[in-house]
Amino acid sequence: MLGNNRKVRTIDIGAAEFAGTPTQPVTIIGQAQSVITACQSVNNSLAFTFSVRVAGTGPFTYALFRDNTLVNQNTASGSDNISFGLFQQVSDNYQIVVTTGCNSVTTTLSPVTFNPLPVQQQPTGGGSYCAGSPAPVVGLAGSQTGVNYQLLRGGSPVGSPLAGTGSAINFGPQAAAGIYTVRAINATTGCQLTFFNAASVRVNDLPTQYSVVGSGAGCVDAIGTVIALNGSQVGVSYQLLRDSVAVGSPVDGNGGDYLSLGLQNVGGTYTVRATNKSTGCKQLMSGSAVYTTYALPTQYAVTGGGAFCSGEAGVLVGLSGSQTGVAYQLVRDGNNVGDFITGTGQAISFNRQTGAGTYTVQARDLNRGCQQTMTGSVTVTVNQPPTVSIVPSALTGCAGNIITLSALGADRYVWNTGATTTSIPVTATGTGVYSVTGTITSTGCSATASQSITIYPLPAAPSVLTQTGQSYPGGQPSVTVDVNSGNVNLAVGGCTGTINWTGPNNTSGTSSPIVVSTERVGQFVYTATCTSAQGCTSPATSATVTVQGRLTVLHRDVDNYADNNAIQPLLVLQNQGSSALPLSALTLRYYLTVEGAAALGNLSVNYA
């Protein structure tokens, strides 16, 4: 072998006589080598062949040597081409030694060079993406300078090769679905390697497009319209968008031909975005629905209201402003009051209102029907006037009397006399009417009461005169008579009503004549009045009856002794009248007074 000392063996075949066909030594009649310079195969698994054709008598032993080191060996009986596969791809000098029972021969030394393959690199990128979205980028985590990299999809080239930079490289976005590999080609040796690892690109379908339905219009406070799709897929959620902003929560598809996304009453353009719940792929549904919102009438403040007294004209209720084309309906406690008023662009009035309650105003757009309650409310309060009366309630009086009239039912009063007190005195001078206006301060409500007073004249004073035809003078308003001279009759005359007389010692009566006794001495005054059928009493008339006794009392003290502390009075009664006086009717009183106002003590009285 090249570079080694050949060892030659001597074979002693003895002296035996050979009989038969002589053995032919082996000779090399041809040799071949598939490559002189080659690329290593992946994992040294690609066989590079060496072949030899020999002549001679077999069997033949073929041995492949690399620098005198046995690499492979094979035995064959034929002399046709024998090939060796070179699985250990080491650059070196290779020879084939063919050996038979007679001899061995060696092929010419064959130098073989194996160029290294490009270094395996890790593919990057790939993955799933949604159709219509940016495709994923495919690349390599690293690269070698002097090596070109060809992207393959399903084994077919994609685009042009990229030259290695010594760093990561990328082949850009790859939209086509498939398995992406890379073939690396050494620009100098031409050795190439298709990398084992691959990047996968998968294109996920977008949700099926369905049409958005449900356009409409309404007032801002209307219930709205249903926005829907004319179909949906199971596993796909559908998000309603208003002017590209999400409205509410997504709705899962039901696989049917109708999917409601709910009532919508906010103006805008409604679209629907579908999202595959497994892949996340999104798709805008076909078309859009437009909901138009009509503005409500502008709110103005309800004005007026307040309190008034029953029977007055009421209070004004109005609105601080209005719009043309809008009807304004006054409402009291939920019920319409009168007909609506069309707005003028200015403040409006609903005139005076007399019904008690809370007033609001409802506005309605005459073109689109949109309604709006105006701001606030006013209250109309109907205060009842006081019930004013005058007591006493039915009044008659006699001329000259003072009558007190009192008002009831209010807290402030004004009489037609100008007085402002609760009660007034009235001096009856004639028939008249008295009125008073009473006011409740808290409400200002007033009422008037009147009282008619009928004044009756007083009867004329009666006459009280002594009765004629008696022993004393007749027809006299006064008379003097002796004690026990008989009764004196006083006749009361000139009264068509009821006679009322009074006399001494609480005597009284209603008849005529008045009988006056003369049994007691003194002056006796009798007064009589006349009361009419209306209860009026005349001025009083008096008559005096004087009863005189004509009795004289003479007195003398007959005790002249100053040292006996005694008094002996002597009384003498003398009747100087014309008639006898009964002693039983007489009372005699004797009065003692001690000098110096000293107390009277040790008094004894003896009388005969």
Image: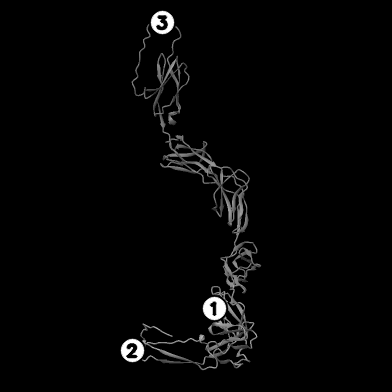
Q: CA distance from mark 3 to mark 1?
A: 186 Å
Q: Please report the residue visible at 34 percent of the width from the left and 24 percent of the height from the top.
A: 3
Residue 478 in the image, given as x and y percentages of width and height: 57, 92
Mark toward the start of the polypeptide (3 vs 1) = 3
> Where's residue 147, x and y in %?
43, 39
In three-dimensional space, the C-alpha distance between marks 3 and 2, rounded to whole angstroms, equals: 242 Å
- Type of amino acid under label 3: Glu
Residue 84, position in %: x, y?
44, 23
Q: Nearer the viewer, residue 452 or 311?
A: 452
Count of marks, rendered view:
3
Residue position for label 2? 563
Q: Amino acid at mark 1?
A: Thr
Where residue 468 appears, as percent x and y from the top left, is 63, 91
If the image is split into quadrants, where does the N terminus sit?
A: top left
Is residue 202 at least partly visible in the picture?
yes
User: Which residue is disc 1 drawn over?
Assistant: 422
Task: Specify few, some or many for label 3: CA neighbours under 10 Å numbering under 14, 14-19, or 20 or more.
Answer: few
- The C terminus lies in which quarter of the figure? bottom left
Query: Tag 2's secondary structure?
Result: loop
